[in-house]
Image (cartoon, rainbow, N blue to C red):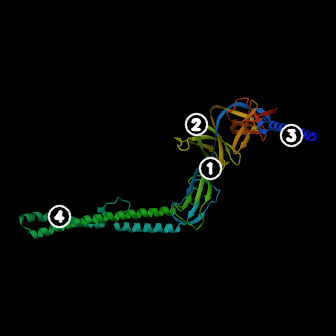
Amino acid sequence: MNPLRSSSGILLSSLLLGALSVSGCDGSRARATAPGDEAPQPVDVTTAVASVAQVPNTLRLDGTLVPRREAQLSPLVSGHVAEVRVERGDLVAEGAPLVVLRQADLRLAAQAAAARAQAQFEQLGVERGSDFEPDAVPEVVAARADSASLDDQLRRLTPLHESGVVDDRTFEQARNAAEAARARYEQARTRARGSHASYVALSSEARLRRNESRNTTVRAPFAGAIMERLVEVGEFVGTQSPVVTLVDASQLRLELAVPERFAALVHVGQQATVTVDGTGQEVLGEVRFIAAALDTDTRTLTVEVVIDNADGAVRAGHFARAELQLDGTRSVVRIPSSALSERAGVYRVFVVRDGVAATTAVRVIETAGELTTLDADLPDGAVVVTLPPRDLADGVPVHVTGRN
């Protein structure tokens, strides 16, 4: 055997074994450092302790403030606008003139109607002021006298006809004449009643026209403020055309929808604290009206809170939040405001249990500076994470570095 070839084979074998050994070591090291085999690293956090407190039982609801009364006023008659005496925002007393219509045309119509009624009355020929009797009309008086005269003549001829002194032809003529006179008398009475009915109708029309001529001014039915003026001088308006909108905001009403589970706790006379949106004003109100039944679609009970506003400090139309004082107390949870997280409108807190963070959804009742009050299912003394890091998630282990 060639000694050189033997030495080369031994050297090649040694190199192959060394390469395999290095490859095996690298594979072991790679398996040892694989990410799937590493335990999650704890996240450093600071914590605080939540506390449970008993507070008065309150219910917070939203609504819109509406005035005590609001009316769109229309004239009692149709006509052209002659004057507009108010502007938007003016304060007016009850009975104050707001809009005046032109009177001339209505006054002329009233005079014409009165003249027609007078002519009809004169045609009747009776005295004014007495109860109407058809037999007092001259035409009826004449017809009645004619009928009575012919009836008397017939009565005198009847015994003479029976004794044969008056022939049948004469008697029949007298009887027909008497019957015709009675018919003319009844016709005269009917015409008199018809003429009187026409007089009554014309008199009513005359009174109506007079009233229309006197009702050309639109007046305020109650004291309040002008919300909107809807007409200008010269416009023609009808009885269905609103000319102004009047509101009485001496009291404000806040309509609230009480959830079904709280319906039994609300009653007339309960006090409510109302916060006006946009101004921050706080006013006191009282539950004054409660619906007789729940709304079957929304499962809520409609109530109205009435707020005295005689000084006009609060304007109608504001959005407002009411806090109703219910009976009894309820449990709330208080935590530092820094422990509250919000995402997509959902509030949550991280609670530390056995060294692991767990998220809990909560409802915020109130935030006052560094303290937030919650409606949440948390025990007294629960440990919550303050200023939660961005990489903190549900189920991640934590390392507490400090407590608040």
In the image: residue 367, left or right of residue 77: right
Which label sits on residue 261?
Answer: 2
Q: CA distance from mark 3 to mark 2?
A: 82 Å
Q: Earlier in the sequence, mark 3 or mark 2?
A: 3
Percent of width and height locating residue 302: 56, 43
Q: CA distance from mark 3 to mark 1?
A: 101 Å
In this rendering, is residue 380 above or below 23? above
Label 3 secondary element: helix
Q: First in sequence, mark 4 or 3: give its number.
A: 3
**Residue 54: x and y, percent?**
68, 30
Position above or below: 378 against 209: above
**Cα distance in 3D space between marks 4 and 1:** 81 Å
**Mark 4 or mark 3, whichever is nearer to me:** 3
Distance between the alpha carbons at the discs numbered 4 and 3: 168 Å
Residue beneath the point at 54% across and 44% down: 297
The amino acid type found where label 3 is placed reads Leu
The CA distance from mark 2 to mark 1 is: 32 Å
Q: Earlier in the sequence, mark 2 or mark 4?
A: 4
Label 4, on which residue? 152
Q: Give the amino acid at mark 4.
A: Asp
Mark 4 or mark 1, which is nearer to you?
1
Kind of element beneath mark 4: helix
The residue identified by callout 1 is 249
What residue is shown with label 3? 16
